[in-house]
Amino acid sequence: EIVLTQSPGTLSLSPGERVTLSCRASQSFSSDYLAWYQQKPGQAPRLLIYGASTRAIGIPDRFSGSGSGTDFSLSISRLESEDFALYYCQYYGSSSGVFGQGTKVEIK
Amino acid sequence: EVQLLESGGGLVQPGGSLRLSCVASGFTFKTYAMNWVRQAPGKGLEWVSALSSSGANTYYAASVKGRFTISRDNSKNTVYLQLNFVRGEDTAKYYCAKGSRYQMLLDHWGPGIPVTVSS
């Protein structure tokens, strides 16, 4: 079973800064099967990126995803106030939908 | 507009049972896989189960396999999650989520329903 490890656990940043979140897999898989979600307090998660780099409908272009094999990343070019949230990566291939443990992006 | 609304949550004793429901609208329900994802208090997301569009194929996380059962009624646009032999670690908010081009790629989520396992 694939295990996804996200790092760091928490990032403290200021609005306007650029941030990159990491998601590392225990074994290699196609980038077709890697997604990123955003979750704000008290809300359901929202799909941001799928296929490692394709933005979901309505997602601003300051969000971008990249990676392949076992190493994937989510970048936010310029943090806005609404971007401070939890972010999860997910593998959705085969017969499992496993999530990483999440990275919290908080206001410094 | 896609909408998903869970119901059936609440307090259940250890070893007991509960059935969650999720009513869907705004899309052709019978053509998409459906999933359940849970989140324990203060913890991360845990994928729980998925069901193919026809209902022929089911998938479960190891932590719930043999205890939980996913099913659907395409005539009622509803997906269910039957929780049996529940344990304290099953306490969580349970989200219903719609699959998309891939069964477990989740493009729409319900607001979630809390389940508390306690005596």
Image (tube, grey):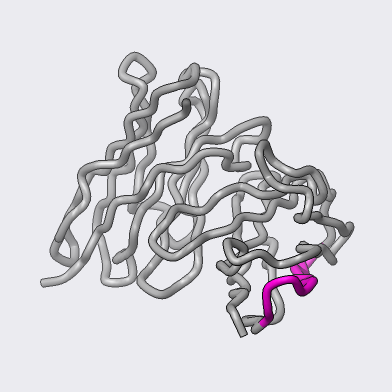
Q: Position of residue B96 (x, y in %)?
A: 41, 43
Q: Position of residue B77 (x, y in %)?
A: 36, 22
Q: Residue furthest left?
A: B119
> Which corner quadrant of the image does residue A76 belong to?
bottom right
Of B48 and B62, the residue lying toward us: B48
Query: Residue placed at 62% from the left, 82% from the top?
Result: A10
Specify start and end residues of the magenta stretch as a single range: A13-27
Q: In the image, is residue A23 part of the stretch drawn in magenta?
A: yes
- What's the magenta bit mostly, secondary-structure-wise? strand
Asked whether the viewer can see residue A75, the reply is no
Compared to B31, does B5 lie above or below?
below
Compared to B44, does A29 lie above or below?
above
Query: Residue placed at 61% from the left, 32% from the top?
Result: B100
Considering the image in quadrants, where does the N terminus of chain A appear? bottom right
Query: Residue placed at 61% from the left, 55% from the top?
Result: A37
Q: Position of residue B118 (x, y in %)?
A: 16, 70
Of A10 and A89, the residue lying toward us: A10
Residue B69 located left or right of residue B87: right
